[in-house]
Image (spheres, rainbow, N blue to C red):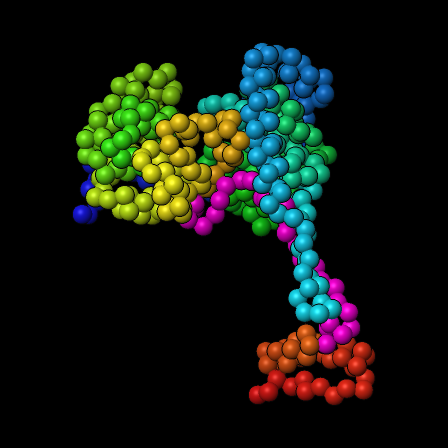
């Protein structure tokens, strides 16, 4: 059967996006030209903050002292999970060498970038978990200098829990600077900091646009849009848990899509009936976000078979993908396009967002069709090297010379010719392209 939309979105993230490019480009240009002073101007304008931009050790200690011990324990637990998972990921990429032909050895080397800039949102919500996810992975990767920046609050500064998390996870510098000015400061090396080689972390549309504009002169984790989540559920799923999980992700923002894909009409209708009451029970800000996201961006899709469900999911390539259905191994093996996969009722996207160990900085807006999320590998350059004996270079030099001449690149060919002439002066070689 053809898939049936029981609820279809009336908006998309693209249609609802504001045109922020010009504004962001102007701010970046002015800060690059004006340096620290211009960044401070924008901090006063947008952050309403006039305290230290670079937190001193005494300020960090004072902020950490304000964090309740129970919250510290939870942050420590989440940090330990993320750290150990990142260490296991790092172990999957190692230096290696391989003898391509006798005497010619090629290899790879994994080198961490020198400076990483981690943006930690602090607008609607204080994203403690983002500090854990971004700083911890950079630390495990071995980055030489890790900068964490987060929007300060007027009269308060960076929320103490964010300061504690960034410090605990290994940030070398903590900045009280938000938005485009925070991204610019890390990129341009303001306030005496090293220039970041890579920018990571979620942020609003202005932060995302700044990263898009700067990409190329600096690396980025990804160009992120509004967070999105999809649940695959069959008739065995608990409709209350499915509805709760959908609402939990809709609270991210007014334009955060959530999708339910199922082959059970009764389940779909039950979930749709439960969602409004669950949204109404949220605190005011969360309620407004979730209500708008459900009204304008949510979809409920009824399919005929689990294969159709899987194909719909792959077509959407969601940031977060949850499976609450029977035969989990089948789904794990079949699904191929997602940022992070949550198998079974016993786990949830919220676990991954906060404390389970996998990273929550993930591809959005369908980007999971071609890329994964933030990991320890994003901070590492996989570079190659080669070394050869004279005999080992012989056959390679011949092939290089002929291929180069066929391409019309005579200079390349001669770089091979001179080596053959020097190493094997008594031998004759046919070094023409053969045309």
Can you say whether 409 is above or below 146 in the image? below
Instruction: Decide: is 8 above or below 102.
Output: above
Closest to the observer, 91 or 139: 91
Vertically, is 234 above or below 109? above
Left or right: 304 with respect to 208? left
Q: Position of residue 337 (x, y in %)?
A: 40, 46
Quarter in which the C terminus is drawn: bottom right
Instruction: Reply yes or no: does residue 393 show up in magenta.
Output: yes
Q: Is residue 308 visible?
A: yes
Q: How many marks?
A: 0
Name the residue located 71 percent from the left edge and 70 percent from the top edge. 102
* Residue 409 occupies quadrant: bottom right
Q: Is residue 225 magenta?
A: no
Asked if residue 150 shows in the view, the reply is no
Looking at the picture, how far across and down is residue 39, in whole percent? 62, 32
In this orientation, which residue lies closer to the viewer: 118 or 382?
382
Q: Which residues are magenta?
A: 365-394
Query: Residue at left 65%, top 36%?
Result: 140
* Above or below: residue 400 compared with residue 97: below
Residue 160 picture quarter:
top right
**Residue 232 appears left or right of 347:** left
Which x, y percent locates residue 347?
A: 41, 28
Residue at 36% x, 43% y: name it.
Answer: 330
The residue lying at 67 percent from left, 60 percent from top is 98
């Amino acid at each position: 059967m053809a898939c049936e939309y029981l609820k279809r979105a009336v908006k998309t993230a693209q249609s609802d996006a504001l045109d922020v490019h010009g504004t962001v480009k102007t701010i970046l240009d002015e800060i690059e030209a004006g340096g620290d002073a211009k960044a401070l101007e924008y901090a006063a304008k947008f952050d309403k903050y006039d305290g230290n931009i670079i937190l001193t050790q005494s300020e960090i200690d004072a902020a950490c002292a304000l964090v309740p011990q129970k919250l510290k324990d939870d942050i420590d637990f989440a940090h330990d999970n993320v750290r150990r998972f990142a260490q296991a990921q790092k172990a999957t990429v190692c230096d290696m060498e391989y003898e391509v032909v006798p005497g010619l050895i090629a290899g790879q080397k994994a080198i961490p970038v020198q400076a990483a800039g981690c943006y930690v949102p602090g607008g609607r919500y204080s994203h403690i978990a983002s500090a854990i996810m971004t700083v911890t992975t950079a630390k495990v990767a071995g980055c030489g200098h890790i900068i964490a920046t987060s929007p300060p609050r007027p009269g308060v500064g960076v929320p103490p829990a964010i300061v504690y998390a960034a410090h605990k996870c290994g940030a070398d510098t903590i900045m009280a600077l938000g938005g485009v000015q925070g991204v610019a400061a890390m990129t341009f090396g303001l306030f005496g900091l090293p220039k970041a080689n890579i920018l990571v972390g979620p942020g609003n549309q202005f932060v995302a646009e700044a990263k898009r504009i700067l990409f190329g002169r600096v690396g980025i984790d990804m160009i992120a849009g509004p967070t999105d989540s999809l649940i695959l559920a069959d008739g065995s799923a608990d409709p209350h848990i499915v509805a709760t999980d959908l609402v939990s992700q809709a609270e991210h923002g007014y334009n955060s899509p959530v999708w339910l894909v199922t082959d059970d009409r009764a389940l779909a209708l039950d979930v749709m009936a439960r969602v409004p009451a669950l949204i109404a029970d949220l605190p005011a800000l969360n309620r407004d976000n979730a209500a708008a996201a459900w009204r304008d961006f949510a979809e409920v899709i009824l399919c005929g078979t689990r294969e159709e469900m899987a194909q719909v999911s792959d077509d959407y390539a969601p940031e977060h993908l949850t499976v609450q259905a029977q035969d989990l191994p089948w789904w794990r093996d079949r699904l191929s396009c997602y940022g992070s996969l949550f198998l079974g009722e016993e786990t949830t996207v919220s676990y991954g967002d906060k404390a389970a160990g996998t990273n929550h900085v993930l591809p959005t807006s369908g980007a999971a069709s071609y890329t994964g999320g933030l990991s320890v590998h994003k901070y590492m350059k996989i570079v190659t090297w080669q070394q050869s004996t004279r005999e080992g270079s012989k056959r390679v030099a011949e092939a290089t010379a002929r291929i180069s001449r066929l391409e019309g690149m005579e200079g390349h060919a001669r770089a091979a010719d001179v080596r053959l002439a020097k190493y094997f002066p008594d031998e004759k070689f046919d070094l023409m392209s053969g045309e």
